[in-house]
Image (tube, rainbow, N blue to C red):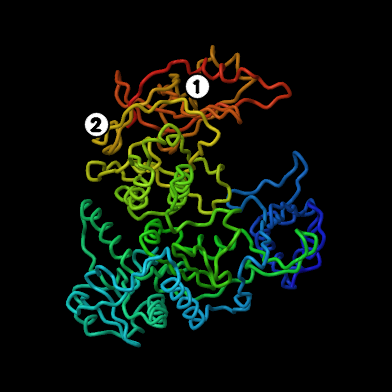
Amino acid sequence: MLCATCQQLFKNPEWKGVHHADIESLNNAARSGCPLCRPLQHIVKQCVSTRDLFRYPWSYRIYTEENEAQICLDIDWPPGDFVELQENEPGPICFPMLAIPSSSIMLNSAIRNRGSSLPLHEAIASGRRWLDECLDGHELCPKNTQPSSYPDLLLELDGSTVRVISPVERKISSPYVALSYCCRDSNSDFLRLSASNKEAFEKGISCSELPTAFCEAVDLVQGMSIQYLWIDALCKIPQFQSHEEHSSEWAELEVIYANSIFNLALATVQNPTESCLGGCPSHVGLPFQVETSGLIGDDVRTIVPYQYYPNLLYHQPLGNRAESMQERFWSPRVLSIGLGELFWDCTQLQNASESLPQGPAAMARWTKLRQTVIPRTSDRMKLEEFWWLMVEEYSDCELAHPETHKLAGLSYIANQLASALDDVYIAGHFWKTLSYSLNWRVDPQLAPVRERSRKPQRIANMVNNKVDERKLEAPSWSWASMDGTVYISRPWNFASLADVEAYTLAPAMSDKNVKGTRSASLIIRTYCREVHWIDGKPMIPQNLWTPLENFHWFQAKLDDEHDTPANGTRLLLAALIEDDRMCTWEGLVLQQVKAEEDIYQRIGHFQFHRIPAEEPRETWQDDYRSMLDQRRALTLV
């Protein structure tokens, strides 16, 4: 039941108004069970200076478009006065939600009444309904009830017993499910298939001997009338693998997931020894319905918090495992056990949940929901945007072996897009986009809502200089040379300043000054300026900078602090893009690999900005060109 304060949001509201004026009011509303104040209270409690957040009353703002209304709860700070959040605190403090006409979105409100666990019988019913609808009624989805190939081994599910079988020897023709899960603790002690226990597995073991999450997965799959399940830990005997064998393993996994009837993703557990059937905490915002008047007409609205999908699915442990991203694209369907409810994705029905069994409807237009299907479009802009969303999501995730798997973990999606774009894929980039895609950044301030932002490190620095023993996949100019969150600038407002003239896929050089074997080199031609690294930053020559420093500011950021040059080191600024709307130039900070050769590796990113003023300087483009006046060809490795 909405509290009286929240009811005003839906009864003839102004476009902007006061929400709770103090923390006591918010706490009382949360204790009463208000579905908006409970999650808002939880957000506020995560901050150290809780009461400072109510120095001013909280407010609401309403934005309308067509039939939907976006409602945002936050603090309306006066100019120059705000609470500075600590490094480990969430930010920004904001609770947005979308009001969608209930006539256009199906809501199962009973999910809100679940207790501290996810009822298995309800989960089975939801999964069976989605699967039946997909197989019987979805024209865009494959009808792969009989796989074209099988894994070497499968688990046969027989009531309370499971046994390892060879599909070829048994000549089976039934579908199987492929499991995705986390194992964050490499020393986690649970039953795995090995050479010593394979015979026992073939005879059959009790489900009670399996890790808790695996046992729950067995029950769910059997409940959906499917007899076979593939779990890597129970269907493969671990063996030492070379780099080449790791590469072939990706191809084997693609075949396994692609031939499954669906991928069962255990999203909420960090290890299979945990239960994946936990309930949803009361402070997590779930969709609900409310009668409205004067919001956009008088009707019933379904309210979906923007953090519904991230909290219940995306930001769960499996969402932090990079390998699972490609698994969901390989699979024809994904059934995810999220926080307190199930989620479903297939080609024709994406982002469905037990709360929203037919998907999020108009919400997909307002916020970035996770993709599970490569767009079926010839629109290059949409395909490029999809790729960079994938790169950003992927870079947020943790990869077990980034030094060898960084590019392999996105290879399936990259190959599919290369065909759709009619383009050449080069070390994490596409040839036709390189003039702006080289402008990636590691600055976490660019993406404050990305909750898992990880401090980036250059992968070459992580292998303890054992580069002769490892084959690093990515050159320094590629985002794939980093382990950690990257941000990709979109080209919609940009003009390219650089020409990318050629690429070489063979290793550029085997010089000790370059950390790791480089898989690709580029030749670019652009505006450059030699500078020196002085006291922690690149210094532009005084005769160029002093006349302009009152009109512009210059910022440079290293990709990895471990790459900090020695004082006095000569560097090169190489411009990439011009943003006419923001009056900026951006580009690369480069370090020469070998003296007397124009071969460079990337170590950072720079920006020139025009300082806002009543009469801003109109000659900003000429100013930047005067500082970067050497247009020359460079080789990037």
Residue 309 in view of the camera: yes
Q: Residue at x 58, y 47 (%)?
A: 448
Question: Dot 1 corresponds to which residue?
Answer: 539
Out of 625 and 460, give the one closest to the viewer.
625
Outermost residue, top side = 543
Residue 24 in view of the camera: no
Q: Residues within 10 Å of mark 1 (few under 14, many from 20)?
A: some
Q: Residue at x 51, y 17 (%)?
A: 625
| 630, above or below 79, in the image | above
Q: What separation in Å lies between label 1 and label 2 (alpha carbons)?
A: 29 Å
Badge 1 or badge 2: first in the primary sequence: 2
Q: Name the quadrant containing residue 49.
A: bottom right
Out of 161 and 384, give the one closest to the viewer.
384
| 575, above or below 146, in the image | above
Q: Amino acid at mark 2?
A: Met
Q: Secondary structure at mark 2?
A: loop
Q: Quadrant of the N terminus?
A: bottom right
Q: Name the side, left or right, on which 333 lies relative to 514.
A: right
Question: Dot 2 corresponds to which residue?
Answer: 509
Q: Name the quadrant containing residue 279.
A: bottom right
Q: Name the side, left or right, on which 408 lies relative to 96.
A: left
Q: Residues within 10 Å of mark 2 (few under 14, many from 20)?
A: some
Q: Amino acid at mark 1?
A: Met
Q: Nearer the viewer, mark 1 or mark 2?
A: 2
| 230, above or below 401, in the image | below
Q: Position of residue 154 (x, y in %)?
A: 27, 75
